Image: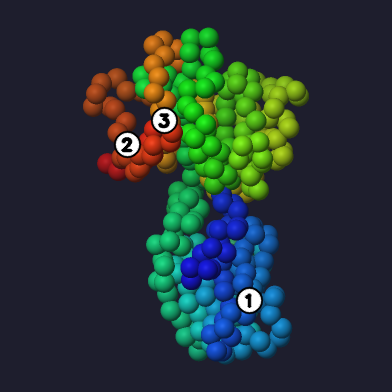
Amino acid sequence: MRRALELAQRGPAGDANPRVGCVLLDRHGDVLAEGWHRGAGTPHAEADALSRVPAGAAEGGTAVVTLEPCDHTGRTGPCSLALVEAGVRRVVFAQPDPNPLAAGGAGRLRAAGVEVRTGVLAEEAAALNERWAAALALGRPWVTAKWASSLDGRVAADDGSSRWITGPEARADVHRRRAEHGAILVGTGTALADDPALTARDGDALLPRQPRPVVVGLRDVPSGAALRRHPEPLLAVRSRDPRQALAAVEDAGATSAFLEGGPTLVSAFLAAGLVDEVLVYLGPTLLGGGRLATIDLGVRTIGDQRRLAVRDVVRLGDDLLVVARPAQE
Ligand code: AOF
Ligand code: ZN
């Protein structure tokens, strides 16, 4: 199962489909083939692994999968039937499929006389697709909001300049986390003021997976903007409404969005209760005036404050990253 989880990680994060890995063993327990899911519209992990073995080779064997094999015909056929037809005798999977449309493979396999075992490394498997499962439950993409601020909560100096408040380690961390999301959101104000590339990079090199860039707001992004050179086509949402932005993200096939500002857009998402995780990178510096990380959140009195629960605090060079989520009331 550990190997299947490694294989699953080769798939795209933030996709319409979860990341799934599969290892096929023959009747003696020797590895026959490995498979993983490469994203919506492509073969599922089980089908991918089965496609790599000669006919009959999996007979009497075992399939180890990170997710319950599906039992539906979506963009591809049911994996439960494919495993039965291949003569697989045992199926071990980590966690049940939370998608009611696809679930049911375990029952189908048992009914066909296949031995089924579940719950192996279930927590690790759930963590791998946490945002995907949350999006399914929420009925909208998962949103991670990120900003980098001074210790006194400012994201830019008075003249709007903001490069750089945090150091190279913190910025590298942002790039890694961008790549874990299906889309990256900025307001047109930020796109015009900062001219961000919004690519996920390791130094100068593009990471293998790039989130879809989405710009939200009423202004145009000029043809010379860095965003126009993003390897994925730019999606423009001509609205300031966070819900419309998320509808566009969903239409683009993404189940998670990395929200990078600025304060107006982030605040609109926060005020609407549409932020699931906040990443605050704190540089050890003070800016005095300048722009605050958020604008009006409708907090008039201390009883209205928006409490967050801290999940993690990470030191990155001279900076701190605070990972927090809205506190459950
Ligand atoms: C599996 N193995 O590798 C994956 C599964 O539209 P489809 O046909 O691609 O089906 C998508 C659904 O299938 C997805 O929402 C999830 O419930 C399940 N994904 N199932 O047996 C896989 N990726
Ligand atoms: Zn399937």
Q: Amino acid at mark 3?
A: Asp
Q: Secondary structure at mark 2?
A: strand
Tag shown at residue 33 = 1
Tag shown at residue 308 = 2
Identify the mark nearer the N-term, 3 or 2: 2
Q: Amino acid at mark 1?
A: Ala
At which x and y percent is residue 260?
A: 53, 31
User: Quarter containing ligand 1?
Assistant: bottom right
Q: Nearer the viewer, residue 323 or 76?
A: 323
Q: Secondary structure at mark 1?
A: strand
Marks 1 and 2 sit apart, C-alpha to C-alpha, by: 45 Å
Tag shown at residue 319 = 3
- Which image quadrant is residue 81 in? bottom right
| 192 w.r.t. 36: above or below | above
- Quarter holding the C terminus is top left
Identify the mark nearer the N-term, 1 or 3: 1
Q: Describe residue 324's horizontal placement relative to residue 30 as left or right.
A: left
| 72 w.r.t. 272: above or below | below
Residue mark closest to the camera, 3 vs 2: 3
Badge 3 local density, few (<14 within 10 Å), some, or many (20+)? many
Residue at the image position 64 percent from the left and 47 percent from the top = 209
Mark 3 within 8 Å of ligand 1, using the beta carbon: no
Badge 2 local density, few (<14 within 10 Å), some, or many (20+)? some
Tag shown at residue 178 = none
Q: Are marks 1 and 3 in contact (CB under 8 Å)?
A: no
At which x and y percent is residue 273?
A: 41, 36
Marks 1 and 3 sit apart, C-alpha to C-alpha, by: 44 Å
Residue mark closest to the camera, 1 vs 3: 3
Q: Nearer the viewer, residue 273 or 119?
A: 119
Residue at the image position 52 percent from the left and 42 percent from the top = 177
Q: Residue furthest right?
A: 223
